[in-house]
């Protein structure tokens, strides 16, 4: 998919993403997946967790290389979008992706957090066009829940 997709291409990209969305993963602790405040919708942190297991485990710069980290970011983003679709009924209700925070479990000396987070950012722009451009933090952290290499949370406008 092209980053500079036309509005028609963006809708097609969004439909393709919707077809690939997983079932919504229920919280593994005491929190809600999505919270609406006015016209903003916040997601909880999502990891590459599906069907009762972490699909990618470990730290970037140790057990996980950048390409596998980018795959983990894509899976985590799809989990965020699945939660949003379940709450909103359709991703078409999203007016703008406001913010995305990407936590990356990083080994000492790993400094490529942005390279990992870029996969999720690129997908959002491909699917939502200009509305998919967002503010972002890509943070290196020592550990994430259940051994996840990546965790993503989002704020969207509806």
Image (cartoon, rainbow, N blue to C red):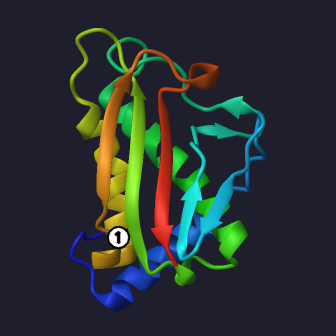
Q: Is residue 21 visible?
A: no
Q: Crowding at label 1, few (<14), some or many (≥20) Cα neighbours within 10 Å? A: many
At which x and y percent is residue 4?
Answer: 21, 76
Farthest front residue in view:
38
Vertical order, 9 against 81 (above or below)? below
Residue at image position (34%, 49%) is: 119
Image quadrant of residue 109?
A: top left
Q: Nearer the viewer, residue 23 or 146?
A: 146
Left or right of 116? Residue 16 is right
Say which element carries label 1: helix
Residue at image position (27%, 87%) is: 6
Picture quarter with the N terminus: bottom left
Q: Nearer the viewer, residue 99 or 147?
A: 99
State how many labels appear.
1
Vertical order, 7 against 79 (above or below)? below
At which x and y percent is residue 98?
Answer: 38, 65
Q: Is residue 72 visible?
A: yes
Vertical order, 58 against 102 (above or below)? above
Left or right of 26? Residue 122 is left
Image quadrant of residue 73?
A: top left
Residue at image position (54%, 77%) is: 39
Residue at image position (52%, 67%) is: 17
Image quadrant of residue 48?
A: top right
At which x and y percent is residue 61?
Answer: 32, 16
At which x and y percent is residue 8?
Answer: 37, 91
Residue wearing tag 1: 132
Left or right of 75? Residue 100 is left
């Amino acid at each position: 998919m092209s980053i500079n997709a036309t509005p028609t291409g963006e809708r097609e990209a969004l439909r393709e993403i919707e077809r690939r969305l997983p079932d919504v993963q229920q919280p593994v602790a005491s929190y809600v997946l999505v919270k609406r405040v006015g016209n903003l919708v916040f997601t909880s942190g999502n990891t590459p967790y599906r069907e009762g297991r972490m699909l990618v485990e470990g730290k970037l710069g140790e057990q996980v290389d950048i390409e596998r980290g980018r795959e983990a970011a894509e899976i985590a983003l799809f989990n965020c979008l699945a939660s949003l679709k379940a709450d909103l009924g359709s991703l078409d209700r999203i007016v703008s992706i406001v913010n995305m925070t990407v936590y990356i479990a990083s080994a000492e000396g790993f400094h490529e957090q942005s390279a990992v987070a870029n996969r999720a950012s690129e997908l959002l722009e491909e699917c939502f066009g200009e509305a998919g451009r967002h503010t972002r933090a890509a943070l290196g952290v020592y550990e994430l829940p259940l051994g996840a290499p990546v965790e993503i949370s989002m704020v969207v406008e509806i």
